Image (cartoon, rainbow, N blue to C red):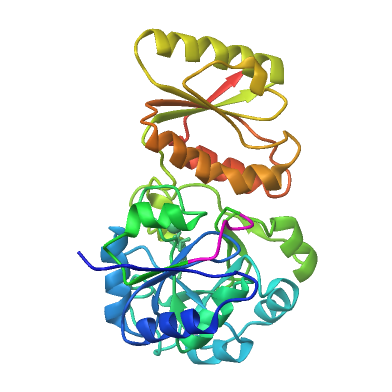
Amino acid sequence: MKKTIFAALDGNNPDRNIIEEAGVIIKNGGLVAFPTETVYGLGGDALQSASSRKIYAAKGRPSDNPLIVHICRWEDMERIVVRIPAAAVKLADAFWPGPLTMILEKSDAVPAETTGGLSTVAVRMPAHPAALALIAAAGGYVAAPSANTSGRPSPTRAEHVREDMDGRIDMIVDGGGTEIGLESTIVDLTGNVPVILRPGFITKEMIEETLQTAVEADRSLPAAGQAPKAPGMKYRHYAPRGEMTVVSGNREAVTRTIVRLAAEKRRVGEKVGIICTDETRSFYDADCVASAGGGTDAETVARHLYEILRSFDSRQVTCIYSEAFSGEGIGQAVMNRLLKAAGHHILEVS
Ligand code: AMP
Ligand code: MG
């Protein structure tokens, strides 16, 4: 067990001493969890292979699942990629700093451990002031996957990081709750056509508008025997401990079905959690009923989703029903994470 240092700061006006201390830890090969605008990241020096190995170990993450390299200055791209395509310049102009990760051909400066052995590297410039300051203090290149144990929902508060990482890493920087609450959009720019490997706050439509070209969305899991494009996609991510089902259809049928299934499960001794909206909350009676927000407010739903899944875990919920959410805008990303959490178990009702 390591002694983990906890340090709270104001995310918008980060304390210089804390940032310096965190930067030194990362430069010396240690690990620091820190807030970004998406979720909390688990940061190590992206250019030291030993740091990346430590990240995999702390998360219990398979080492073929590559890490995202976080930078804080556009000029720093040059050292880690062999070529900067025109699309990357346009996307960075439009969305950086922000919740967009780009996949590019990596240079020799990036160790194979950081990219899970791939010849490409994922790069993002986050928008959070504390994250930007910390990356600069750490030398400019911070590999940071989400700061959760592999397979658990990503952390949106420092308390979530503490649950998973206390005693396993050197420091946790607490900057309060994260604004977006879901991981960054990932776009692969290494082929002829840009491909969205993971939906997020920056939508396909926003990227198409910026690039003025069609963009593909790769939402399917890879076929057996085929190397997955975003290796993370083959794992059951974002998984709560309870068995989860997403119920989709018109509102009346959805609420009626969840009410019935929840009652059946409770009769046989299951502890039931329900994820719903402000509008439907009053219909339900279960062990844990959580509204993620207004039914038309996908941004609020995104911000609350992982926290709800974690609260169900800590209350030992064994069976979860979630209403499906509208797939517009960031709603696409919400549905993507919900379906992953549910192991793609969806019930269509009418
Ligand atoms: P996380 O940092 O926990 O949000 O996970 C990072 C995600 O980015 C995983 O799903 C990875 O598989 C994906 N990723 C990272 N690097 C690459 C890469 N070079 N090519 C494709 N996907 C990547
Ligand atoms: Mg993750």
* Residue 110 seen by the camera: yes
Q: Position of residue 267 (x, y in %)?
A: 39, 7
Residue under the image location 67 percent in, 30 percent down? 277
Seen in the image, is 238 located left or right of residue 64? Answer: right
Compared with residue 26, is residue 57 higher up or lower down, i.e. above or below? above
In reply to whether residue 175 is colored magenta, the answer given is: yes
In the picture shown, does residue 86 fall above or below 334? below
Q: Position of residue 75 (x, y in %)?
A: 60, 92
**Furthest residue in direction left, as rendered:** 1
Q: Where's the N terminus, which quadrant?
A: bottom left
- Front residue of this view, candidates 219 and 176: 176
Ligand 2's quadrant: bottom left
| Residue 83 lies within the magenta run | no
* Figure quadrant of residue 165: bottom left
Q: Nearer the viewer, residue 86 or 50?
A: 50
Residue 196: x, y in percent?
60, 59
**Magenta residue span:** 174-180
Q: In the image, residue 178 lies at what x, y percent?
A: 58, 58
Q: Main secondary structure of the magenta part?
A: loop
